Amino acid sequence: MILARADQLSRRYGDVLALDRVDLDVRAGELVGLLGPNGAGKSTLLNLLVGLRRPTAGRVELFGGDPRDPASRRRIGVTPQETGLPGTLRVGEVVDFVSAHHPDPVPRAELLDRFGLGELARRQTGGLSGGQRRRLAVALAFAGRPRLVLLDEPTTGLDVEARHTLWEAIRAFHDDGGTVLLTSHYLEEVEALARRVVVIGQGRVLADDTVDAIRDIVGVRRVSLLADRLPALPGVVRSERVDGRTHLLTTDADQLVRDLVTAGVAFKDLEVRPTSLEEAFLAITATGGQPSTDVGGRSAAAAGSTATAAGRPTPA
Amino acid sequence: MQLTLVHARYQLLEIVRIPVAVVGSAFFPAAAMLFFVVPFAGKDPVAATFATASMVTFSVLSANIFQYGVGVAEDRDQPWNPYTRTLPAGPAPRFAGRVLAGLVLTYLSLVPVVVIGATLTEARITVPAFLLALATVAVVSVPFTLMGLAIGYSLPSRAAVVVAQVVFFPLAFGGGLLTAPDQAPGFIEAVAPYLPTRGAVELMWAAVGDYPPNPLSMIMLGVWVVGLAALAGWAYRRDEGRRFS
């Protein structure tokens, strides 16, 4: 069963085409990660799906109906931006307010406990830490026993421990049959949670596949080793040296290792790993089009330059 | 309907948690009562009663213009507001809840004026007249609620604060709220019937005593209500169009 659907969905703000003929189906029981740089159109897509905005062209459906019809929104849960919580209301009151809109809400104490907020029910939201506010914002999405939750950057600004707590809650919901569509800045988050990744760039769906497949689209492997100096090697699309360790990105790791051996390089501590999703994602968005497996080398080269320009070594 | 009450309740909670906001809208009319009405008209039952009715109108004016003008404009800046639109309810309960909460606060802001009028002046009123005056408050709230909504939905919050203050004083003085019935300086008597505050205060005077409202003021009050309703409706639709279409 399809819970949310975008069909050739376009949205224009003045001269800017924020979404360009996007197709997306979210089926019951899926956990989908929506990935893309700022301004790619992720938030616009979510706003259209929850009925805050009207499409310029194409169709958007929620449980088979128009998201702008309140009845279509009965089985969804959405997170407010944490900065938007009414500061003078208490935590328990905010939960009660949201619950009042649902026929069969989760009891307040149970919901707060699930998100580690049980002790804070009587605190005003304005006095919460950023992490506590974020957890409350995510908890509100689950207040009405939704079948589909749409989470926009659910763990932005959280420390590692709080992030893992939230991940557990999202996983538990999914394990109980819940459907999740989440956007994230953290590629690690999408890799940890999602089975399916939709990459959006410049308002278009660039890729829609499993996490593994998105990595494989680029076909790049990371070969890292300790060596004093390396000869020029064929098939290396990018190389960098971090803390004395050399990282080589290549489209053919097997051939690269053979070349290293035949060249007689004195290396040690060799590792071959798949690229991170971030590298794959940068490769796809940098080429700006629907990638296919045979453009791996070109994509990876583009990925290399983008990643280097961003000045941050990509975690393996 | 149930949701309207829920929204009204939480909006009141939000406002009451910052008591200064409530005190603020009640303070100015109460102070005006103490400094102008009590010493100058307090001994004469008729004058004191009319003056108290004037201050009640003054209070209704300030409570509505500020809480809608500034409150709505500030709300529109908050991301919480669009979030409530993702809940399974349309914009209507929130809007109706806001108007309901506004009416409650308006009545609340009248309490000091009425208490001062009853205890420190000779103002007297019968029970039926008092009930009629209570109902009249709801009626005269209409133009000022619409005016506040028009300001709140058409301006950003900083501008709304300024505009609310700028329209508030001329309306109060020009409408003759700070002078006894038909005793204002000549130029105020000339412009007053064309201001909504005049029609409003004449209705209040008629409710609490023997005062025949001036037909011109009544007609102009009707014109203001229609005009302000159109302006508020336009501002609301424009805001909806910008943020939710």
Image (tube, coloured by chain):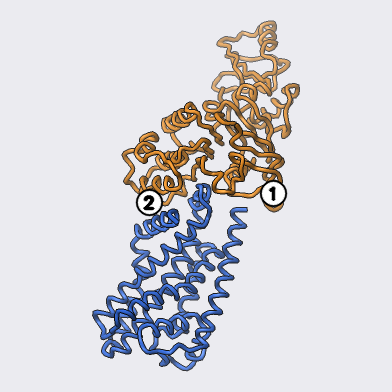
Chain colours: A orange, B blue
Measured Cα–Cα span from mark 1 to mark 2: 37 Å
Q: Which chain does the residue under circle 1 lie in? A: A
Three-letter amino acid code at disc 1? Thr
Q: What residue lies at 73% left-to-right and 33% top-to-bottom?
A: A289
For label 1, the residue is A56
| Image disc number at residue A30 | none
Q: Position of residue B245 (x, y in %)?
A: 63, 53
Both marks 1 and 2 on one chain: yes
**Relative to B41, is A187 above or below?**
above
The quarter of the image holding the N terminus of chain A is top right
Q: What residue lies at 63% left-to-right and 32% top-to-bottom?
A: A198
> Looking at this view, is A176 or B228 the one in front?
A176
Q: Nearer the viewer, mark 1 or mark 2?
A: 1
Q: What residue lies at 55% left-to-right and 35% top-to-bottom?
A: A182
Numbered disc 1: secondary structure: loop
Q: Which chain does the residue under circle 2 lie in? A: A
> Looking at this view, is B173 or A286 the one in front?
B173
